């Protein structure tokens, strides 16, 4: 079921509670897509990366071939949140230094250093990186699979494009009002031949930067809510807390406008391997009944508990057969 969903999409997000197997599912989906001739990219946004461990190789913050590369069609990247934040703040600092008077350079640097520890800075930086990877991914790959951080972080990240677009629109609206006031003031002195105010030129450049940012975030938002191109699959274990977290995450994603195309119940206990596992299976049945009552319209797939660790291409190939 999940492979069929991925076959009809360009972008697939895998989310859910920590430790339920998101990285394994994301890698298996991407590997199968590559084996079938599609160019696939796996992006890990979780600060506690497992992609390299799963593939038994170094991945890091650059797009890297995975395994045998499925004839060069499969790659992965682990977003480094600290490096991403550093680059983001450096770009902002350079822009501010260019726009502000030279004597305020020290104040700009001090402000940006304080911003490094401010709430939201990390999320804004990761959002910029995610935007970049969606753009390049759609250009250079047929499928981009995001292996995301645990549920709460992912829900906030998916909502950020809409929030930040609205915030940027607010800034632009205030700048437009200021510009109209400035134009009116200049109109009172129509006979003046004074050169253009440097502050006015600065304001125009700021406006241009804000417009580019808004358009980029709006484009990302358009991709995220386009159910023809993008879908979200929630991975979970058949346990009480993952089930409750899944229901809450689905509600957040639905509010954001993101299509939830599948639920993947990973590591389902067998019913015919002894009394202990049979009893465990019965408890899981109760939790999954709660899930199905809450989300009856979302397709649900169960993946059995395996006998081996999933590490490397061969094991991922076998795991993909279950999807």
Image (cartoon, rainbow, N blue to C red):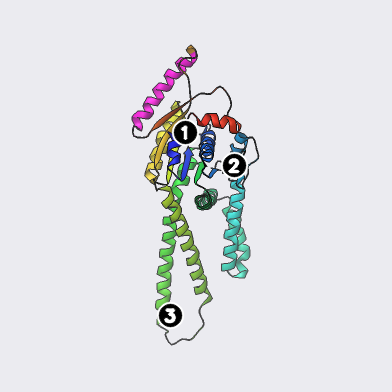
Residue at image mark 3: 186
Disc 2 from disc 1: Cα separation: 28 Å
Give the image location of residue 284, x and y in percent.
43, 22
Disc 2 from disc 3: Cα separation: 64 Å
Give the image location of residue 137, x and y in percent.
52, 49
Determine the secondary structure under disc 2. Answer: loop
Label 1 packing within 10 angstroms: few (<14), some (14-19), many (20+): many
The reply to whether residue 179 is in sight is yes
Residue at image mark 1: 235
Camera-side residue: 56 or 38?
38
> Taking 53 as reference, is 189 left or right?
left
Q: Find residue 99 and name its label.
A: none
- Which portion, as a residue range, is magenta? 276-297
Label 3 packing within 10 angstroms: few (<14), some (14-19), many (20+): few
Which is nearer the N-term, disc 3 or disc 1? 3
Which is nearer the N-term, disc 2 or disc 3? 2
Determine the secondary structure under disc 3. Answer: helix
Residue at image mark 2: 71
The majority secondary structure of the magenta stretch comes to helix
């Amino acid at each position: 079921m999940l492979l069929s969903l991925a076959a009809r999409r360009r972008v697939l997000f895998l989310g859910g509670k920590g430790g339920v197997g998101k990285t394994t599912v994301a890698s298996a989906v991407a590997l199968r897509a590559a084996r079938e001739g599609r160019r696939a990219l796996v992006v890990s946004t979780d600060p506690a990366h497992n992609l390299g461990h799963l593939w038994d190789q170094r991945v890091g913050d650059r797009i890297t071939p995975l395994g045998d590369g499925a004839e060069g069609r499969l790659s992965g990247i682990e977003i480094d949140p600290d490096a991403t934040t550093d680059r983001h703040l450096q770009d902002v600092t350079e822009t501010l230094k260019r726009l502000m008077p030279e004597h305020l350079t020290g104040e700009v640097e001090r402000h940006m250093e304080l911003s490094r520890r401010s709430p939201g800075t990390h999320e804004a930086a990761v959002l910029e990186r995610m935007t970049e990877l969606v753009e390049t991914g759609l250009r250079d790959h047929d499928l981009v699979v995001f292996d995301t951080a645990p549920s709460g972080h992912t829900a906030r990240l998916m909502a950020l494009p809409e929030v930040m677009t609205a915030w940027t629109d607010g800034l632009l609206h205030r700048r437009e009002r200021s510009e109209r006031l400035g134009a009116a003031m200049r109109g009172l002195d129509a006979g003046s031949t004074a050169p253009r105010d440097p502050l006015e030129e600065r304001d125009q450049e700021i406006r241009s930067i804000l417009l580019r940012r808004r358009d980029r975030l709006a484009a990302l938002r358009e991709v995220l809510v386009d159910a023809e191109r993008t879908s979200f699959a929630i991975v979970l274990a058949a346990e009480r807390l993952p089930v409750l977290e899944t229901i809450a995450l689905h509600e957040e994603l639905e509010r954001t406008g993101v299509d939830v195309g599948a639920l993947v119940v990973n590591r389902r206990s067998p019913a015919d391997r002894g009394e202990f596992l049979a009893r465990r299976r019965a408890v899981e049945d109760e939790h999954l009944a709660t899930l199905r009552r809450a989300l009856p319209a979302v397709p649900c797939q169960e993946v059995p508990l395996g006998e081996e660790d999933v590490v490397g291409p061969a094991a991922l190939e076998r795991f993909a057969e279950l999807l």
